């Protein structure tokens, strides 16, 4: 994968890019959250916008939905990434497309996607905002690699 292939996928159009791990369950969430706890700098967890301690058990995070919104923010190399706890069967992250300015950041995203895929043995997709069906990058558990999806092959 070369920067000239993917550069247009990260153009500054004001939208975010999203990373999805599909077909997940609570054990996948727990594994990923436990791994993220080890990131440096430490992830920041917010409940209703207020900084608070990340619960040990991910079930408690989903229980927090009864009282408000939850978000876990962390750094992947120099990219700010947010994890949203919307539904159990889909793990969703987002990042600002403007932060991806070259192949180094794309490689960091690819490495992060490989980590997610290896932890869960699930498909991982990076796509434009709210468009899980149009993967820009795709991790396949069968070959354990992240590949760029050309625009004509999306959907």
Image (tube, rainbow, N blue to C red):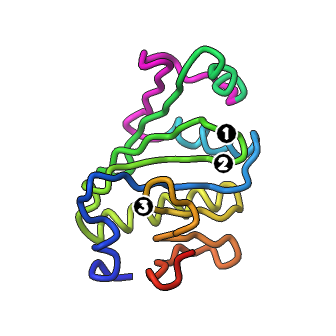
Say which of marks 1 and 3 sits in front.
1
Residue in the image at 51% along x and 39% along y:
38
Q: Circles 2 and 1: CB distance less than 8 Å?
A: yes
**Which region shows up in magenta?**
39-58
In the image, 115 versus 11, the foreground residue is: 11
Q: In the image, is 8 to the left or to the right of 31? A: left
Residue in the image at 67% along x and 39% along y:
87
Residue 36, percent across and down? 53, 41
On residue 87, the disc is 1
On residue 109, the disc is 3
Label 1 Cα crowd, 10 Å radius (few <14 / some 14-19 / many 20+):
few
Residue in the image at 62% along x and 61% along y:
117
Instruction: Provide the residue designation for mark 2.
Output: 90
Residue 105, percent across and down? 32, 62
Label 1 or label 3, whichever comes before in sequence order: 1
Q: Taking 67 as reference, is 144 above or below it?
A: below
In the image, 18 versus 72, the foreground residue is: 18
């Amino acid at each position: 994968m070369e920067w000239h292939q993917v550069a247009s996928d990260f153009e500054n159009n004001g939208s975010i890019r999203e990373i999805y791990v599909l077909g997940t369950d609570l054990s996948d969430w727990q594994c990923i959250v436990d791994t993220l706890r080890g990131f440096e700098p430490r992830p920041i967890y917010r409940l209703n916008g207020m900084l608070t301690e990340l619960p040990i058990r991910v079930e408690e995070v989903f229980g927090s939905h009864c009282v408000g919104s939850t978000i876990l923010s962390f750094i992947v190399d120099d990219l700010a990434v947010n994890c949203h706890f919307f539904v159990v069967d889909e793990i969703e992250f987002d990042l600002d497309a403007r932060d991806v300015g070259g192949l180094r950041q794309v490689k960091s995203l690819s490495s992060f996607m490989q980590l997610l895929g290896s932890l869960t043995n699930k498909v991982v997709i990076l796509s434009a905002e709210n468009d899980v069906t149009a993967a820009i990058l795709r991790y396949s558990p069968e070959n354990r690699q992240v590949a760029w999806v050309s625009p004509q092959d999306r959907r």
